Amino acid sequence: MIRQLTSSERQFAAAILLLAAGVGLAMAATGRHDPLGVHGVIVLLFSGTLLYPVLTGFYEPEPKEDREASYYDDPIKVGIVLTMAWAVFGMFMGVWVAAQLAWPDLAFDAAWSTFGRLRPTHTSGVIFGFGGNALIATSFHVVQRTSRARLAGQFSPWFVLFGFNLFCVLAVSGYLLGVTQSKEYAEAEWYADIWLVIVWVTYFVLFLRTIARRREPHIYVANWYFMAFIVVVAILHIVNNLAVPVSWGHAKSYTIWPGVQDAMVQWWYGHNAVAFFLTAGFLGMLYYYLPVRAQRPIFSYRLSILSFWGITFFYMWAGSHHLHYTALPHWVQTLGMTFSVMLLVPSWASAGNALLTLNGAWHRVRDDATLRFMMAAAVFYGLSTFEGSFMAIRPVNALSHYTDWTVGHVHAGALGWVALITFGSLYTLVPTLWNRERMYSARLVEVHFWLAIAGTLIYVFAMWNSGIIQGLMWRTYTEDGALAYSFVDSLVAMYPYYIARAFGGFLFLIGAVVCCYNIWMTVRSVPLAKRRERDVPAAVAVPGE
Amino acid sequence: MPELFHRKLERSAIGFVLAIIAAASVGGIVEIAPLFTIDETVEEAPDMRVYTPLELAGRNIYVREGCYACHSQMIRTLRDEVERYGPYSLAVESQFDRPMLWGSKRTGPDLARVGGKYSDFWHVAHLINPRDVVPESNMPAYAFLARTELRTSDLGQHLAAQQALGVPYTDEMIANAPRDAYGQAFPDSEAASGVTERYGEATSVSAFDGVATRLTEMDALVAYLQVLGRLTDAAFRDTAATEQAPDAED
């Protein structure tokens, strides 16, 4: 890691880390009576830990070879390790909170382990920890290969990667301490949010500068999606998190958005976190790794254009469908519903484009579990976007909202689409990146595939059942026009499904552990590949076109 | 020739990013900006009061513990919800709420109008161990709240931050915040009268957790739960409702 940096880059890295440690110290001092102080110590330890390898490698010989003649893959490798670590952590927390709903005593009478504090560690752990690291790692890989140029920075990729993980650590540890803004999927407090802006702007500049030095006339479609992901997430994050801290010594802040406006901003953010973090970014993955693995070009360039701009434009209108029948003005609800239904067109254009790309390669889908991961991801993407448009229709939403149906829908997307496309991409990427002939065990990939599919289906079916039963029980009347069921009646009916859901999630977690083992053994024991066609800048075929 | 144009756009990184920003900005601007300019968005409620310092501290505990993950505070305009929980929620009822806590999931029931529905004693017993009161419940136990002293020294700063954002706290309220928090949970103390003076006669002054020797987080959370839905009568009056509840066949 350090060997690849020149002496002045090492000095710069050390200076940044010392600066971060100084900020941590200041936070620890001003926030000594507050959870902010704990976070100061965490920042200090995080920077100190990274400073150690920088200082021990400080006087190593500088790199002699021309760095521009090779791709910059070290940050990607570390990114993949972090991706899998967060996957296991986030999914474990998910299984734990799911089990708490069936067996509430699993909180063990402590404050930090109650459902309300653990739940965001699961959502942030998988969305930002697992998903975010996967996006950063794969975007670094895809942008270099499709631009046939090395990343436009030596230190900044590390800054982005570790900076982002510091954000994740602050977010997740904060929830355990009770530090939260309570904005769903944006729970981290003001200082972590400011830090993420700094990291994200660096990411944006790095990505754009890398694209600018491409040796291809056109920007490949995967990079459109990565750019949309980076740019729009920045806009959403900044607007939604505008807040006034109680003081410089407080972790707590108050959002500038009041009541109904806050609800609209929150769900404009919340729904587009799904759109641009969990959809656009992962479509970027799909548009590169699927054609590479299938060895087929993307089916249609026009469909790619249609779906990209459709998603970028329509999604931003859709957030208000989270607020049907609420105190949000009716006209906003109607707009949200309308655009949510229209979203089906670009969504299915993407899913269809992916599946039609597999035409002529279906025998590979049968034999190769890695490609099957990506095929299944595209199918789940199509199914859950259809379900999403359906649930955004007001009368449907009257039944589904506030119930487990929503939770099931989210997981059809998160497990079936996001996680499956990530695993498919990682199984494609890992052997290439470490220059191995293949994954350690194709059979374990197969085992992982079926664990993931079984887990997802059990989860989603359990939540469909519980959600629809719940919604119907709440609105059932007796013949004399009284409500037929108390709230507790509906809760009692949920228990079997909560147990089934925890089991489905557990299968999915086991699959992720199998994946970790397979990656580990690939790097450790699979022999090096014979020099394939030279994987260096400006000498690689671009897939797709 | 749209395809030809796109071919050009694909050659410029900056141009492409600008196009993304343009396409992505429209929806948010059209849906969010008018919420600040159209007056009907938030109804009038001249009788509405702000949270007392103790209630605000309780609200912050509600946020800290992630209660919103399982409890909504938004009664929709549907017949069964109105009959189960009370009049549907109005925008004005959360006008001082930063952040709003409308929620998105009901693993437990809606709490928008839970204030006054149960006794303080019921709430304390329920929070210490929900299954003592509701055997079928899957809610976590919050016994630690009764063991944890409430931090009041910085409540003035909390109120000041809210004031800076436009919540109508007076300077007097800010100056007396820790004292008022104490007074609201100690009905027999001298500080108690200041609470009703500043926040109105209807403000509930009570030894919320049943222990009159110290001020705990349990006091604050119960004080907050007991005021939910009771800051204004607007929802019970015949206000300019934005929408009629759909009929039962819906």
Image (cartoon, coloured by chain):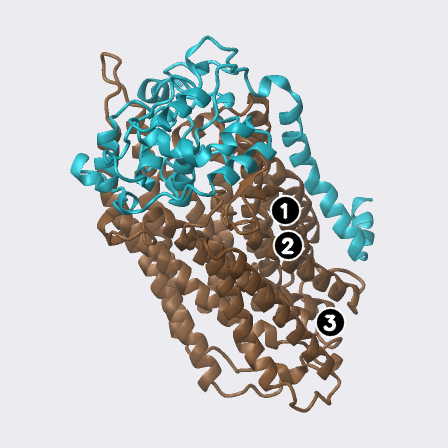
Chain colours: A brown, B cyan
Q: Amino acid at mark 2?
A: Val
Q: Amino acid at mark 1?
A: Ile
Q: Residues within 10 Å of mark 2 (few under 14, many from 20)?
A: some
Q: Residues within 10 Å of mark 3 (few under 14, many from 20)?
A: many
A56 to B100, vertically: above or below? below
Cα distance between the residues tagged 1 and 2: 7 Å
A294 to A344, vertically: above or below? below
Task: Establish whether labels 2 and 3 are both on one chain.
Answer: yes
A71 to A452, vertically: above or below? below
The image quarter in which residue B103 lies = top left
B218 to A55, vertically: above or below? above
- Element under label 1? helix
Frontmost residue, A56 versus B81: A56
Q: Residue at x 41, y 24 (%)?
A: B194
Q: Residue at x 82, y 48 (%)?
A: B5
* Residue A407 percent coordinates (x, y): 40, 43
**Quadrant where the image shows the C terminus of chain B:** top left
Q: Earlier in the sequence, mark 1 or mark 3?
A: 3
